[in-house]
Image (cartoon, helix red, strand yellow):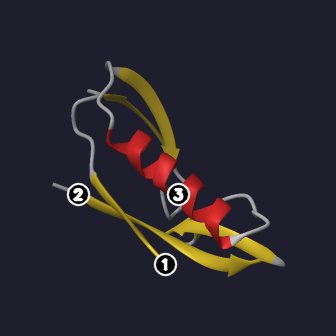
Amino acid sequence: MTRVTYEVVEHDGGWAYKVGDVFSETFFSHQEARQAADRAAAEHEQRGTAQPIEYQDAEGKWHEEISSGDDRPETDVQD
C-alpha cells in the first residue's frame, strides 16, 4: 500500500503543509496548518466510487484513467 506524508512547514510568511514538492495555501499559524493537514490526510484515505481522473506525468504527458475509489493510500502528518 502507498503511504503519503503531509509535512507542516514554514512557508511564504506563514505555515503550510506539503506533500512532496506541492504546498497548500498559507495559514497564519502552525496550529491552523496542522489542523488543515490532518483534515486533508483523513480525506485522502476515504474510499469513494470509481471516478475518471486526469494527471500530468513528469515529462508533461497527460493521462486519463479510471480510479476505482478503493485504492486509497495510508497517510500521516509530520511537524
Q: 35 above or below 5?
A: above
**Which one is nearer the viewer's eye here, 69 or 7?**
7
Residue 19, numbered label: none
Q: Amino acid at mark 1?
A: Asp
Q: Amino acid at mark 2?
A: Thr
Question: Dot 2, crowdedness within 10 Å: few (<14), some or many (≥20)?
Answer: few
Quarter where residue 68 is shown: top left
Query: Residue under circle 1?
Result: 79
Q: Amino acid at mark 3?
A: Ala
**Rendered residue at 45%/31% (across/down):** 53
In the rendered image, residue 44, in percent from the top left (x then y), is placed at: 40, 44
Give the spatial CA distance, label 2 vs label 1.
20 Å
Question: Dot 1, crowdedness within 10 Å: few (<14), some or many (≥20)?
Answer: few
Given this view, does label 3 or label 2 mark the residue nearer the observer?
A: 3
- Tell me which label, 3 or 2, sits earlier in the chain: 2
User: Looking at the image, do the residues carrying marks 2 and 1 touch, with CB atoms under 8 Å apart?
Assistant: no
Given this view, does label 2 or label 1 mark the residue nearer the observer?
A: 1
**Rendered residue at 73%/77% (across/down):** 11
In the rendered image, residue 35, in percent from the top left (x then y), is placed at: 56, 56
Give the spatial CA distance, label 1 vs label 3.
10 Å
- Tell me which label, 2 or 1, sits earlier in the chain: 2
Secondary structure beneath dot 1 equals loop
Q: Specify whether 66 is left or right of 10.
A: left
Q: Specify whether 36 is left or right of 74.
A: right
Query: Residue under circle 3?
Result: 37
In the rendered image, residue 26, in percent from the top left (x then y), is placed at: 76, 64
Question: Dot 3, crowdedness within 10 Å: few (<14), some or many (≥20)?
Answer: many
Secondary structure beneath dot 3 equals helix
Query: Residue under circle 2?
Result: 2
In the rendered image, residue 73, in percent from the top left (x then y), is placed at: 27, 50
Secondary structure beneath dot 2 equals loop
Quarter where residue 74 is shown: bottom left
